[in-house]
Image (tube, rainbow, N blue to C red):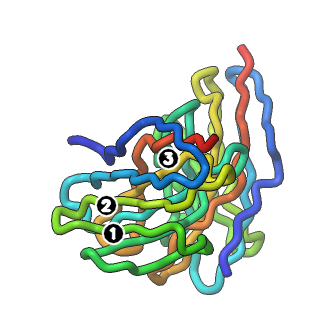
Amino acid sequence: AQSVAQPEDQVNVAEGNPLTVKCTYSVSGNPYLFWYVQYPNRGLQFLLKYITGDNLVKGSYGFEAEFNKSQTSFHLKKPSALVSDSALYFCAVRDEGNTPLVFGKGTRLSVIA
Amino acid sequence: DAGVTQSPTHLIKTRGQHVTLRCSPISGHKSVSWYQQVLGQGPQFIFQYYEKEERGRGNFPDRFSARQFPNYSSELNVNALLLGDSALYLCASSLKGGGPEQYFGPGTRLTVT
């Protein structure tokens, strides 16, 4: 069965500094990996995905993520954080088959001005 | 283009009552999935429908049911509501069963008192 771990409940970073939100996964077969962001009282907004190809994936709003197969990780990164990036971030995984997304418990990112 | 829409936005029900939540997918998308997000947790998969057939079901009791209509919209029904059913219910659509990525609606906030 698939699973996702987001080891940090909360990440605090100063505006302008680089940010990393960690995610590790477990899946049988090749993983499809996703990052979503959730703002207060809103649904989930798609940021980026890894299906195959280049291990560095670029997504919306300057975010990127690096797929590391040996470490089974898919950490979300951004070179320079903005206060408006403050939100709840979810990592999700599914396998190649027609299986539903499995989400981590989320990491709350707080960017301080 | 319109995204995934859900109705109602909020509702309050009493224990033992029944509730119906509605979802309209992105135009051209034929697959709809439902997720439950309890406060402080990541979304959990409830159902997936594709071409009006159930293609997957999560670990939820039989009080939860769903259906998809010929226009690909969907309803989630929950009978005999419990306090623990209080959550944000998210609908996601994708082009076909399994994605690759799913696009989420804003959710319906259900409060059971």
Compared with A61, A106 (above or below) is below
Give the image location of residue B81, x and y in percent: 57, 55
- For the point 64% across and 85% down, the residue is A28
Mark 1 falls within which chain? B
Pointer 2 residue: B74
Q: Is residue B72 left or right of residue A40?
A: left
Find residue B28 and report its image quarter.
Answer: bottom left
Q: Name the element at disc 3.
A: strand
Confirm or deny contact between disc 3 and disc 2 (CB under 8 A): no
Find residue A79 and report its image quarter.
Answer: top right
Q: Looking at the image, which is closer to me, B21 or B90?
A: B21
Establish whether labels 1 and 3 are both on one chain.
Answer: no
Q: Is residue B50 left or right of residue A45?
A: left
Confirm or deny contact between disc 2 and disc 1 (CB under 8 A): yes
Pointer 1 residue: B67
Q: Looking at the image, which is closer to me, A26 or A66?
A: A26
Give the image location of residue A98, x and y in percent: 44, 80
Q: Amino acid at mark 1?
A: Arg
For disc 1, the neighbor class at 10 Å (few under 14, some 14 to 19, many from 20) is some
Q: Which mark is residue A76?
A: none
Give the image location of residue A103, x and y in percent: 63, 60
Give the image location of residue A94, x and y in percent: 55, 72
